[in-house]
Image (tube, rainbow, N blue to C red):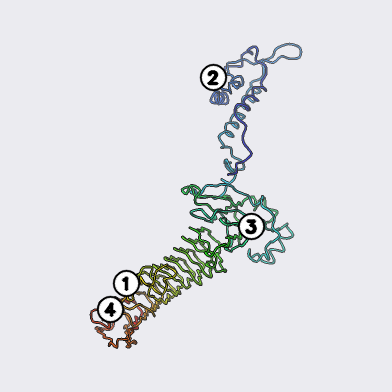
Amino acid sequence: MIISDNTPPSPAKSNAALSNLQPSLESPPPAYGPVVGPSEQQHRQYQPYAGSPSSALSNVLRSPMDHYTDVEANGSRRRESPGKRFCKAFAVAILIYVLVAIFFGTIKMNGQQSRTGWHNDFAIPNGIAVISCTRGSEMQNSSTGWDSLQSIDFSHELLAKSSSNGFGYGTVQTSLSLPLSSETLFLLSRGPSSSGNLRIKSSSTLEEGTARVDVRVSYAEFAKRDFSLLRRTSVCLVHKKQGKRKQVGVGLFTSRDWPSSPYPRSQLQYDVTLVLPESRGPSILRINAFETDLPNFHHFFTQSLDEFVTFGELILKAGNGIVNAASITAENATIHTSNREINIRSLTSNTVSLYTINSEIRGHFIISQSIDIKAVNAKVKANIELYPEYPNGGGSIILQTTQKALEAIINIHNPSYFSNFFNFSSSSIPSKPSSTYFISASNKNGIVDVSVPLLPPDSALNLTASSTNGRVTTALPATYEGSYSLLTTNIVGEVHIEHTEDPEGLERKRLWDSNKGNGKDIRGSVYWDRSNRNKGSVVLKSANGQAELFL
């Protein structure tokens, strides 16, 4: 923790200095007058207790009944004027007040309260403890500056006008080290005008057991403003208070009193790179937990991370920032953002949770237990591969959005196909696992299109797909056996039987029971073995839209 050098003088030293400034008091002066004013009452309030190191101030804080006299040059004694005595007393009272205010850290300057430790003026969350901080103004200048100012989106006219007024920009940088043995590594940012990019890469020269965080701060500043961008930003080594330094990370903070700007975008940008060591052995690096809480930051993982690192717990939060990743492997993964897209080329995890608003979610997800994709006013396009974690299978898939299309292709595999990743022994997996899988897809004012091309034999599938003011379409494989129902309001539903060949090669005939009713409430069953007619369940619902089922 960095502590300010502006430590106030101790009360004892200050009071001793005051006592040396007082006139000689060897003999009592004459009467000063009977009037007791407000300033004298204030003096009594700050009078030190007897025997304290500040008792010398008792000579300063005399009772109004004490007598002061001055000796003129001719030896005659004259009485000091009441106005002069009042001014002296008032000055002493102000001095005492200032000393007390400094001692308790409550003095105000320029309308802002001064705190112990300059980093307390930054937007640091309550649950975060600071180990050390570096201001932007204390960082090293970087030879790599902004390639252009387009990221700030200044107009050419504004740039030309501002250049003549002293417009300037530049880049500074710093680096911090984090121990990979920590329970959790995390990155967070807080404060106005805090935005930027995060990347992760590997290095063969980095020491084993240590991660490095490189932070580059690019800034654009208008000299005529009484304001310093770099002094109002800091990069800190922090830890979570509840973690007792077992959860360590890097915090990017800007000052709480960041003024409003007439310019269209922020004048400060962070470029953060998490550098991880390449494994020296046959196994790749594993990080217990990695978290980001970076509002207005883009997460660009263009390198395939699973080539050199896997994560236990992976949590990425990037409000108003894109999350774009080539390939990630984690035991559990959570990715949340808003107003920007989530685009994952490949994510392998036991459980996955994705959320965004006003932008698209798309990607290829390989899971063993569950996936939960929720969006608002956003298109969802997911390709999901479910490899059950346990030999008897089972898994859950939840898809939800509004206003935009929801499209998903879901393949449910036999556990033996993915035994290497989950360390299963193929001999322990039954040839016909008995398992139940749950799929729920819902939309409001948008279509739902869910296809399940692959389902293990003897597996039970419970699927619900629904929409308001949108079409619902579902396609299932020949291995599906169970009931189905289509419920619509204004448009007649349709069921199509397309698979007639026995998927197990036993030359069984596919049976089909159906009760169409009025076409808006269609119920029935499809099966290869009559004992399986109610094994699974498929329900399609659409208000003001059509429902179609392909079997």
Q: Report the amino acid beneath label 3.
A: Val
Q: Which residue is mark 2?
A: 50
Where residue 482 is drawn, which disc sits there?
4
Q: Nearer the viewer, residue 447 or 413?
A: 413
User: Which of the 4 image quadrants contains residue 269?
Assistant: bottom right
- The numbered mark, 1 or 2, whose residue comes first in the sequence reads 2
The mark closer to the camera, 2 or 4, is 4
- The numbered mark, 4 or 1, whose residue comes first in the sequence reads 1
Q: Which residue is mark 3?
A: 217
Q: Nearer the viewer, residue 263 or 347?
A: 347
Where is residue 14? Give x, y as percent. 63, 28
Q: Which residue is mark 1?
A: 435
CA gap between label 2 and label 4 equals 93 Å
Q: Report the amino acid beneath label 1.
A: Ser
- The numbered mark, 3 or 4, whose residue comes first in the sequence reads 3
Residue at point 35%, 74% (across, down) = 466
Where residue 216 is drawn, which disc sits there?
none
CA gap between label 3 and label 1 equals 53 Å
User: Which of the 4 image quadrants contains residue 68?
Assistant: top right
CA gap between label 3 and label 2 equals 56 Å
Q: Report the amino acid beneath label 4.
A: Gly
The mark closer to the camera, 3 or 4, is 4
Residue at point 57%, 31% (across, down) = 100
CA gap between label 4 and label 1 equals 14 Å
Which corner quadrant holds the C terminus?
bottom left
Question: Relative to 42, does residue 455 appear above or below in the rendering?
Answer: below
